[in-house]
Amino acid sequence: MRKINLIFLFVFILFGCGKNTKDYRELEFKNRDREAYDNGKPYSGIVTKEESGKSAEYKDGKFIKFTKQKKNGYKKIEHSDGSKEYYDYNNNRISKEEYYNN
C-alpha cells in the first residue's frame, strides 16, 4: 500500500499540482485509449492507474504521453508520436536496454 501511495505522489509531483487527475475507471475511452472523455466531454489532465504505476496525460481528449514507473523507480515515457524516453530512479536519462535489464 505504501508503494502505491509513493507512486501516486510521484506522478502527482511529476505532472504538477495544478492539473486535473482522475482514476482511469472514472473516464470513458475511445480509439484504443487515444481519446478520453469525462461525461461525454473531452478530458484534459492526468489519468492514473495507481495499482500498476501507470499514468497518461490527455489534452482536449487527445493522448499526449504515457508513463510507466517500475517498482525500482525506473520509468518509461511514451509520447503520442511513438517516441520513447527511459529514466532511472534519479531521473537521469538511460538507454532502453538499461531500462529493461533493471
Image: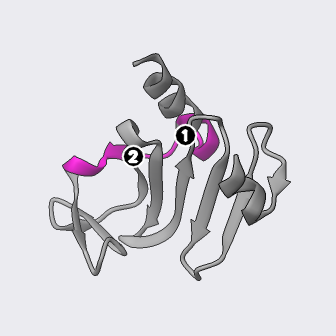
Image coords of residue 83 (percent x, y): 65, 77
Closer to the chain start, of discs 1 and 2, is 1
Which residue is identified by label 1?
Answer: 11
Indicate the secondary structure of the residue bearing disc 1: helix
- Does residue 17 appear in this view? no
Disc 2 marks a residue whose amino acid type is: Thr
Q: Nearer the viewer, residue 35 or 93?
A: 93
Q: Which residues are magenta?
A: 12-25
Location of residue 38 (image quadrant): bottom left
Which residue is identified by label 2?
Answer: 48
* Residue 64 left/right relative to 50: right
Disc 1 marks a residue whose amino acid type is: Val
Can residue 22 be found in the magenta stretch?
Answer: yes
Q: Nearer the viewer, residue 94 or 20?
A: 94
Mark 2 burial class by Cα count in 10 Å: few <14, some 14-19, many 20+:
many
Image coords of residue 73 (percent x, y): 65, 37
